[in-house]
Amino acid sequence: MLRLSTADACIVIGQADAAANIRWANNTVTTNGVVERATLSIVSIIGRRVASVTRTHFPPQHIEAMVRESEAACRARPEAPDYVPLVTGGASPPDWGARPAAADIRVLDAFVPGLATLFERARGTSVETFGYAEHGASTVWLASSTGLRCRYSDQLGKVEITGKSPDFKRS
């Protein structure tokens, strides 16, 4: 993508996100699933003008059109008052070509027995539980025409639980 650019400088940012989740209501699991999303941003710099294009659908045959769109947007922009030249980089990080961090529904397998225990105890006290558990993973890549290459992966989990009285007047 960087090779396609005719701008003075270019930055490409790719991001892959995945999340596995379980949702429950009335002490019963209602849904679960895995969601995946990818985004691609192309930032063009011409002189002191900067513009970008971001897409969540970018088949290979559309990449050059994205680059041209970013360049056209850049030409139409005024100069950026806070412009600074891009940082130069060296070698790519060792994990540059590694697969993105993933979230698989099986990552929640250890959580499910505890959820069953929660439902059992809640029923014993006439409490209705509602909630959501999620494990997410994200990887971001950044590459610039000045040689900078960065990659960052992260994972995050969360659990949200609400207990309600049978008449739903208290939670």
Image: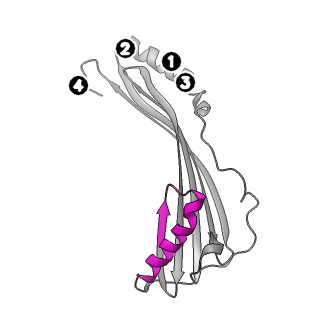
Image disc number at residue 169: 4
Q: Is residue 59 above or below residue 78?
A: above
Where does label 1 land, which residue? 117
Range shown magenta:
52-77
Dot placed on the residue nearer the N-terminal end, 2 or 4: 2
* Disc 1 from disc 3: Cα separation: 9 Å
Dot placed on the residue nearer the N-terminal end, 1 or 3: 3
Dot placed on the residue nearer the N-terminal end, 4 or 1: 1
* Disc 2 from disc 3: Cα separation: 20 Å
Q: Residue at x 45, y 28 (%)?
A: 31
* Disc 4 from disc 3: Cα separation: 28 Å
**Mark 4 against mark 3, which lies toward the viewer?**
3
Q: Residues within 10 Å of mark 3 (few under 14, many from 20)?
A: some
Where does label 3 land, which residue? 112
Where does label 2 land, which residue? 125
* Mark 1 touches mark 3? (CB < 8 Å): no
The three-letter amino acid code for the residue at tag 2 is Thr
**Mark 2 against mark 3, which lies toward the viewer?**
3
- Front-lying residue, 97 or 114: 97
Q: Residues within 10 Å of mark 4 (few under 14, many from 20)?
A: few
